[in-house]
Amino acid sequence: MDLELSSATLLALLLGSVRAAAWLIVCPPFQSRVIPGPLKALLAVALALPMVPKLTPEVPAAQVAPILVSAAEQAVVGVALGFITALFFAAVQAAGDLIDLFGGFALAFGFDPLAQTSTSVFGRFYNLIAVTLLFATEGHQMVLRGFLESYDTLPLTGTLSLSQLSELLTTGLDDMFVSALQMAGPLIAVLFLTDVALGLLNRVAPALNAFSLGFPAKIFLTLSIAGTAIAVLPRTLAGIVETAVKAVVSISGGG
C-alpha cells in the first residue's frame, strides 16, 4: 500500500514542526537538557501532526523564498510563545533565589549540569519541585493545550501583535515578582524579624557580639521553616499555569 502525501501537506507539517520545535527549546519544563534533542524533534513533529489538516490551506507558495520567510516567522512565533510561558514559570526560581539571599545561602552557588549555569541551593530545589508538581498534577497538558490553541488563533499567515507582546512582558514581570513574594514572603518576614532581634540584642549587650550568630541562626531558621514556603507552592503553581496558558492564547489572537 503506497501512501501519497501532497507537497502542501508536507509543507504544513514542516512549518508547524518549526513552530513547535522553537517553542519546546524555550518553554519549561520541556526546555530542560533532560529531554534529548532528537526526542524534542520527534515531539515537535508529534505536536504539529494533528494540526496538519488545519494548516494545509494556509501554506505559502512552494518556492524557496516564501518557505524560508514563513519558517523564520514560525520560529519567531514559537520562541515568543515559549518565552512568555517561561517568564511566568521563572517566579518559582525567583522565590528560591530570594530565600537564598535572605537566608544566607547566596554564597553557596552550585553548578547545574542540566542548565549549564551556576544556581543557588533553594532556587534549584524549588525548580525541581515545581517541575515534579507540574507533571504530577498534569499541568504540562494544560501548557501543551495552550500552545496547540495557537495553531487555531494564529495561522501560518498570521503575525504576532507587538503591542500586546510588550504589554504581556510588562505584566508578566509584575506577576513573576508577585508570585515569588507570595511563595517566599513568609520565610523572608521571619528572617527579617531575626535580623531585627539580633540588632536589638547587639544594642542591649554589645559584648555578646550577636551578629556573629546571624548566619548560623538564619540558616537554621531557613532549613526549619522552609516547608512554609513549599506549602503554598502547589496553589501558586496552579495559578502560574493558568495565567501562562491565558497569556499564550491571548497573544496568539484568542479570547
Image (spheres, rainbow, N blue to C red):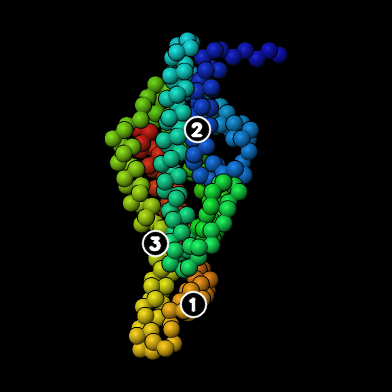
Disc 2 to disc 3, C-alpha distance: 31 Å
Q: Residue at x 44, y 56 (%)?
A: 94
Q: Residue at x 39, y 61 (%)?
A: 182
Q: In the figure, 153 relative to 144: above or below?
A: above
The location of residue 201, given as percent across then percent down, is 38, 85
Which of the two residues, 205 or 36, is positioned nearer the viewer here? 205
What number of labels is visible? 3
Label 2 close to label 3 by CB (< 8 Å) = no
The location of residue 198, given as percent across then percent down, is 40, 81
- Residue 44 seen from this side: yes
The location of residue 63, given as percent across then percent down, is 47, 10
Which amino acid type is shown beneath numbered disc 2? Ala
Q: Write down the quadrant of residue 102 in the picture.
A: bottom left
Which amino acid type is shown beneath numbered disc 3? Gln
Q: Secondary structure at mark 1?
A: helix
Q: Which residue is mark 3?
A: 182
Tag on residue 217? 1
Q: Secondary structure at mark 2?
A: helix
Which of the two residues, 77 or 11, is positioned nearer the viewer here? 77
Q: In the figure, 101 relative to 246: above or below?
A: below
Which of the two residues, 154 or 106, is positioned nearer the viewer here? 106
Disc 1 to disc 3, C-alpha distance: 23 Å
Task: Classify residue 110 as left or right of residue 193.
Answer: right
Q: Which residue is mark 2?
A: 22
Q: Nearer the viewer, mark 2 or mark 1?
A: 1
